[in-house]
Amino acid sequence: MSGHSKWATTKHKKAVIDGRRAKLFAKLIKNIEVAARLGGPDLDGNPTLYDAVQKGRKSSLPNDNIERAIKRGSGVGADAVEYQNIMYEGYGPNGVAILIECLTDNKNRAAAEVRLAVSRNNGTMADPGSVSYQFSRKGIILVAKNESATEDSILEAVLEVGIDDLEDRGEQFVITTDPSLMVAVRSALQSSGIDYESADVEFVSSMPIQVDADTARKVIALIDALEDSDEVQNVYSNFDLSPEVLAELEQE
């Protein structure tokens, strides 16, 4: 089974609908800036930037914001930016593993905000290596179900490239692949006329644990508190939800 968080899709929908849209946009913009800084402003020659822009567009990020982010990231203009990538490790309620990815221009501020969010939400910080050993980088591609995007059509499109897993999540499919093959997989989908919602490299745990609804609420509260910080770009965890628990949470 794919390790991509079952809560991620619901969380993303809620972010677009409610007042967290501004936070979502800020993180999408930062992704674009970093991708442009690392690989240049040419979308055709920078697949990471291409995917960051694609994700922004799918989330209704205005084109003007996208263009300005590309310019800032590639060092064009007086407001060019540079961020440092920092990973923190911790534990949430009931020993759930948490991996926290920050993109920041101030390491001390990022560390302080992460520690405060963790300590206030039933979590503890962990030593480097305590949690990260169970996470590995995976390419995660989300495809919305429609007439052209079925399980059979997706498998046929990526047959020659190869994928690790294809999971049916109700309204969408989650494709898991080696990070080095992610561009080839999404290109194969596009060549077959199959659109995709997002393509990201994520950290996926090899040791997922099922949690009950009460623990899930506490873990989600911790993740939300961390993601409220402008310094935190992504939070990964090993908690997994049964269909029953997920349905209960989605009704809240």
Image: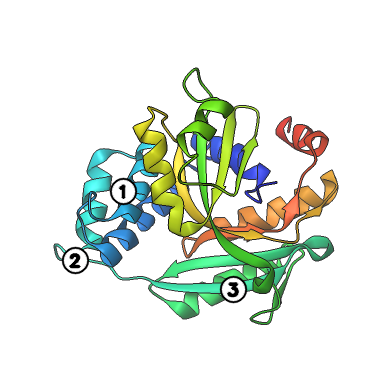
All told, the count of numbered labels is 3
Residue 126 as seen in the image, left or right of residue 156: right
List x then y, in percent, for residue 178.
Answer: 52, 56
Report, in whole angstroms, how far the alpha carbon at label 1 lies from the one at label 2: 18 Å
Residue with the mark numbered 1: 50
Q: Earlier in the sequence, mark 1 or mark 2?
A: 1
Decide which of 4, 230 is in the foreground and name it: 4
Q: Earlier in the sequence, mark 1 or mark 3?
A: 1
Circles 1 and 2: CB distance less than 8 Å?
Answer: no
Residue with the mark numbered 3: 88
Report, in whole angstroms, how far the alpha carbon at label 1 lies from the one at label 3: 27 Å
Asked whether the viewer can see residue 25, the reply is: no
List x then y, in percent, for residue 101.
Answer: 53, 66
Q: Residue at x 45, y 54 (%)?
A: 181
List x then y, in percent, for residue 164.
Answer: 59, 49
Mark 1 Cα-neighbour bin, 10 Å: few <14, some 14–19, many ≥20: many
Q: Earlier in the sequence, mark 3 or mark 2?
A: 2
Residue with the mark numbered 2: 75
Q: Disc 1 vs disc 2: which is toward the camera?
A: 1
Asked whether the viewer can see residue 1, the reply is: yes
Mark 1 is on which residue type?
A: Tyr
Q: Is residue 189 above or below residue 219?
A: above
Mark 3 secondary-structure assignment? strand
Mark 1 secondary-structure assignment? helix
Mark 3 is on which residue type?
A: Tyr
Q: Residue at x 71, y 61 (%)?
A: 206
Please, which residue is most extreme toward the left here?
Answer: 77
- Tell me the quarter of the picture where residue 128 sits: bottom right
